Image (tube, rainbow, N blue to C red):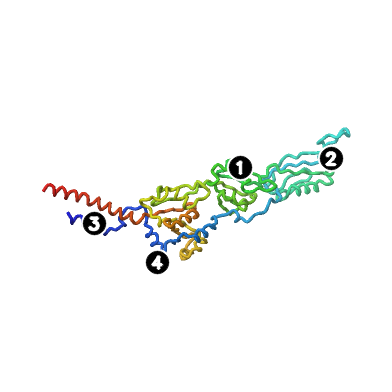
Amino acid sequence: MRAIVFAAGAALAVGGCSAIPSAGPTAGDVIEQGAPQAEGRYAIVEVDDRTVQLLRGRAADASLTSFGDYRGSVEPRVGVGDVVSLTIWEAGAGGLFSPSLPTDRFVPGSRAANIPEQLVGRDGTITVPYAGRVRAAGRSTFEIQREIERALEGKAIQPQVLVSVTKPLSSTVTVLGEASAAARLPISPRGDRVLDVIAQAGGVRAPINESFIQLTRGARTARVAMSRVAANARENIYVRPGDVLTVIRDPQMFLAAGATGRNAEIPFDAEGITLAQALSKAGGLLDYRADPEGVFVFRLEPERIARSFDEARHLVGRGGTVKVVYRINLRDPNGMFLASQFRIFNRDLVYVSNAPLTDAQKVLQLFNLIVSPVSSGASIVSVTR
């Protein structure tokens, strides 16, 4: 019987901890496989005050400021597809647009004529009686008025013209997605910013911390958190005719794994959270399993951020992002302060490794599981004798 017991113990010893069930790699495994001499598939960065300061200035992946357009409102121009109306006044009765009066009495409106609404054609012109085809596209209403008045000189009695754009379809912004009411909205002459247009569309249905604004202008597109646009006036840029604003709901999440109270995909439920808050949402560290020195954050960092860390520079240049694993020691009291300042980003993986003693306890439990039936059988045999 002793031989069987010893054989079982030898098998566990030979198998080592790799045969023991685990929720993930140990802290030693993560550090060892990230070392440069192990061909550095990822970089291990220790979280300290310098790391926190460098990441604090980490900019978002996109910005509306990249459009570089901070101009205010420009003078509206009539475009193809707009609907315009004309009113023409004359200084006296009996002209082209004013009927003859039987008496000298003044009759309000008798010297004016309203021309029916018309669409600015594909050739960019409109038709005005006795003036012919007048170019409208690309001009302001004032310029169109002056052109018509010059065309009517000598035909009408001191004509005065008023041009109104009743449907400015060429000067609109399209709002789509999670806005309360998707619409095609005209831009006011004073100029409208991104949030002004979204407000005209009824606001957003989703919480602001889960909403993103995607602006498409020509061939360019940028997507920014709505909370950022609301907090930073530079992001709230002026819209331009033809812009498309799409409100997208995208709840920010992080993944918790390992020796935490909750292994799951967990929403931020806020504009942004820190590592300390993330661990709290994940149920904290499990006292009987967790290794406080083995708290890691797995992240794909842009190369511009990875260059800031000596440990990651050897990985820069291999692609658009760099695999970085941040390690924080929560056994050190200062680590608690660092965790409360270290920002968590969307899709980060927060991993807490098992303590070394946990694997040893598992080995002993397996050993007892194997040995107990053998010991019980030996006891029964000895009693029967």
Q: CA distance from mark 4 to mark 3?
A: 34 Å
10 Å neighbourhood of mark 3: few (<14), some, or many (≥20)?
A: some
Where is residue 351 shown, x and y percent of the image? Answer: 41, 54
Res 285 label:
none
Residue positioned 36% across, 54% down in the render: 354
Q: CA distance from mark 4 to mark 1?
A: 57 Å
Report the amino acid beneath label 4.
Answer: Gln
Does residue 305 lie above or below 262 as drawn? below
Q: CA distance from mark 1 to mark 3?
A: 72 Å
Q: CA distance from mark 2 to mark 4?
A: 95 Å
User: Which type of secondary structure does the marked residue at label 1 adopt?
Assistant: loop
Q: Are marks 2 and 1 in contact (CB under 8 Å)?
A: no
Q: To which residue does mark 4 refer?
A: 37
Q: CA distance from mark 2 to mark 1?
A: 46 Å
Q: To which residue does mark 3 refer?
A: 9
* Mark 2 vs 3, N-terminal side: 3
User: Which type of secondary structure does the marked residue at label 2 adopt?
Assistant: loop
